[in-house]
Image (spheres, grey):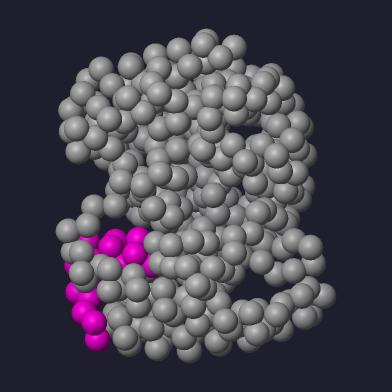
Amino acid sequence: MVDFHQNGNIATLHNLRNRSLEEMTYELETFAQTRKMALILPCLYSELATDAMPKILSELSKVTYLHRIIIGIDRADEAEFRHARAFFQGLNQNHMVIWNDSPRMKELGNRLDKMGLYPSEQGKGKNVWSAIGYLLGCQDSDVMAIHDCDILTYEREMLARLIYPVANPTFPYQVAKGYYARIGNDKLNGRVTRLLVSPLLLALRRVIGDRDYIDYLRSFRYPLSGEFAMRTNILPDLRIPSDWGLEIGVLSEAWRNLAPKAVCQVEIADAYDHKHQDLSPEDAAAGLNRMATDICKAIIRKLAADGTVFTNNVFRTLKATYYRSALDLLEAYYTDAKMNGLALDRHSEEASIELFAECIMRAGETFLENPHETPFIPTWNRVHSADPSFLRDMQAAALADDREFQ
């Protein structure tokens, strides 16, 4: 995606293909002397058996500028945690594997639950939140990056390009969001961004009018990417959604807390492929069906917090406007795919649009029925205020798990 286009809302840092990885790595090593960098990897135990993780591990072992890697492991029993610890021994950096399901971590969760501060849902959001808590407890990192653990096309250049904008002390950016072309196996992927988020934002603009927040989200070429980097000073006040609206939620927090000039998006790969979720049309609590609903709720909640009034009539109009917008965009995606020799099944794409239209209505109904819903995990500043020893105890629990299962 070589171009130099800037839309004026946030900075877009392109890959103009005239700089080597070695040169960028040298600069990152220089920055790391005074600005320590950490990487967080939210991981399901099952992902260790995929084709993606061994390649990610091999690439990360060659990275020389990272001070610390924190791996959060979900859905693992004791034997699986032992295996996970052994699996990540191939990393050359200081690293910690956090067993989120350990008895010690569950005991800490019960402690938070009694104060009404425990995350309402298990999943990627809680995993990331817990890893951030451990990182804050370490008090030794200035920059943090996060990326998923199912990237089949992973190369260490992705991390270098992702972390560079916030690691460079002469740049103004506090948050960097990764973007890339969603192409894999000669197919045009990225259904939720292409067929839900993009047409939904167009429809919202037509139905409720211009909003700075909508323009802000539309500025991102791939708002649902799981790759972003931040300066750690903003982490204590970061509200992380507990549902599948994590990526939109983080962008919304950047919008709430930072000036637009402090946020950028950076091209980190020519193409990107990862594990694809099932559409799950028969189960609203699974796959892309649930993901799409949670994303819609995240956008609706943010607009409502900024003063937009939603009613049943608004959501019905929004659904109809979205459907027409999505079909119009589908025509553009189809011709783009065909011109570039990529496969695109129009029938399945239209079926996805129909499902996503229902997700918009479901999200709207949920919002109207539960106006007091608080889906965000409490910030670490609030946790520290309620229990000043919690971060220290959490760090001690992770270290104890690590020592016990060596």
Q: In this view, does 382 lie to the left or right of 73?
A: left
The residue at the point 31 percent across, 30 percent down is 109
Relative image position of residue 153 (x, y in whole percent): 74, 49
Q: Does the magenta stretch include residue 310?
A: yes
Magenta stretch, main secondary structure class: helix
Relative image position of residue 149 (x, y in whole percent): 62, 42
Locate the N terminus and report the quarter of the image it occupies. bottom right
Chain part drawn in magenta = 296-313
Q: Please tell me in which quadrant of the rendered image residue 63 appears.
A: top right
The residue at the point 24 percent across, 82 percent down is 312
Relative image position of residue 41 (x, y in whole percent): 56, 35
Foreground: 394 or 252? Answer: 394
Tell me: residue 81, above or below residue 264. above
Instruction: Look at the image and tell me whether residue 115 can be seen.
Output: yes
Foreground: 252 or 215? Answer: 252
The residue at the point 30 percent across, 73 percent down is 364
Relative image position of residue 18 (x, y in whole percent): 77, 47
Foreground: 244 or 180? Answer: 244
Q: Please tell me in which quadrant of the rendered image residue 347 appears.
A: bottom right
Foreground: 340 or 346? Answer: 346
Instruction: Look at the image and tell me whether residue 164 can be seen.
Output: no
Tell me: residue 82, above or below residue 265. above
Locate the C terminus and report the quarter of the image it occupies. top right
Q: Is residue 355 magenta?
A: no
The residue at the point 59 percent across, 25 percent down is 79
* Count of numbered marks: 0
Q: In this view, does 342 lie to the left or right of 268?
A: right
Q: In this view, does 120 lie to the left or right of 181?
A: left
